[in-house]
Amino acid sequence: MTSNPPGHRTDASRVTRHASRAPNRLERKFGDLRAKGEKALIAYIMAGDPSLHETEALVLQLEQSGADIIELGVPFSDPIADGPVIQKAAERALRSGTSLRKILQTVASLRSKTQIPLVLMAYYNTIYALGEAAFCKRAVEAGVDGVIVPDMPPEEAGPLEAVAEQTGLQTIFLLAPTSTPARRTVVARRSRGFLYYVSLTGITGAKLTNLAEVRRNVAKIRRATDVPVAVGFGIATPQDAAQVAGIADGVIVGSAIVRQVGEHQHDPGLPERVGRFVRSLKAAIAPSGASSTA
């Protein structure tokens, strides 16, 4: 890995440019939630699973059910960070003919119906095949707010990061519990929109067990940045979500939602079934005494 890849900007220049522009949907959402004393529910689904038509319906249902931000996975044939549930979802999406270009078309279609913040989670080869500049330009034009690239550490993100900054696309980096203090500081300062803290080592779908460690590490991250910290991996139940909401600014639920999609993919009531589960998650993280989403 290179420490200063081509296109890399210093933290100081990034902060100045970041501060001078208007906030995007992600920043506005976290700001609105913070003002109300609420935490963000970030729901992940695999785009194209079981079809892009269903993806569009699911996004609208997820928003109605209380999701604050939605991550759309871009299917990839070798998803190294993902467990079997999301791997199978990627296989279903690829079989349905899903591609990055078609996902961007779906996002553009959604933007006539919703302004919920949308984040793409895409492996770097998918972006590289389109080209960093073309990807960022088309993503922003379609209405994408941020991008997470799980196999691209910030040390190697310079070319994509520079173009994303110019176009207004938020680059969201992941931070693992094994990260050193120096790396924690770098990732915290480079993340835009929010920082994705991976609650455990391993792949998606594993069980969250060490909440005390999550609490300690989130506190350390907050000392390095004022960017919201969202926690993902291992959050499978409303009880899990409630515990993490007491620690972080956002709760990311992926495999548990994708599992619902897989189990009910042939059910004409799929969006409503998934929506009921998401409502239970949102109710669990609501401030004490607040009414849950209808």
Image (cartoon, rainbow, N blue to C red):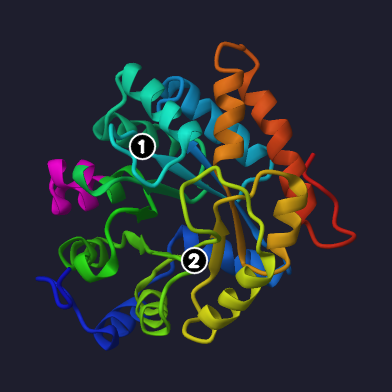
- Residue 113 location (% of width, % of height): 50, 35
- Residue 58 location (% of width, % of height): 55, 30
Question: Is residue 220 visible in this depiction of the protein?
Answer: yes
Residue type at the position of mark 1: Ala
Rendered image: mark on residue 37: none
- Which quadrant, please, contains the N terminus? bottom left
User: Which sits earlier in the primary sequence, circle 2 or circle 1?
Assistant: 2
* Relative depth, front residue between 203 and 113: 203
- Please tell me whether mark 2 sits on a helix, a strand or a loop: helix
**Which quadrant of the structure image shows residue 182?**
bottom left
Q: Is residue 126 left or right of residue 244?
A: left
- Residue 131, relative to residue 264: is it above or below? below
Q: Say which residue label 1 marks.
A: 108
Q: Is residue 150 left or right of residue 218?
A: left
**Which quadrant of the structure image shows residue 97?**
top left
Q: Which residues are magenta?
A: 126-138
Q: Residues within 10 Å of mark 1 (few under 14, many from 20)?
A: some
Q: Magenta stretch: residue 42 in it?
A: no
Q: Which residue lies at the image location 20% right of the left edge and 66% below the top edge?
A: 156
- Which quadrant, please, contains the C terminus? top right
Q: Say which residue label 2 marks.
A: 27
Overall secondary structure of the magenta section: helix
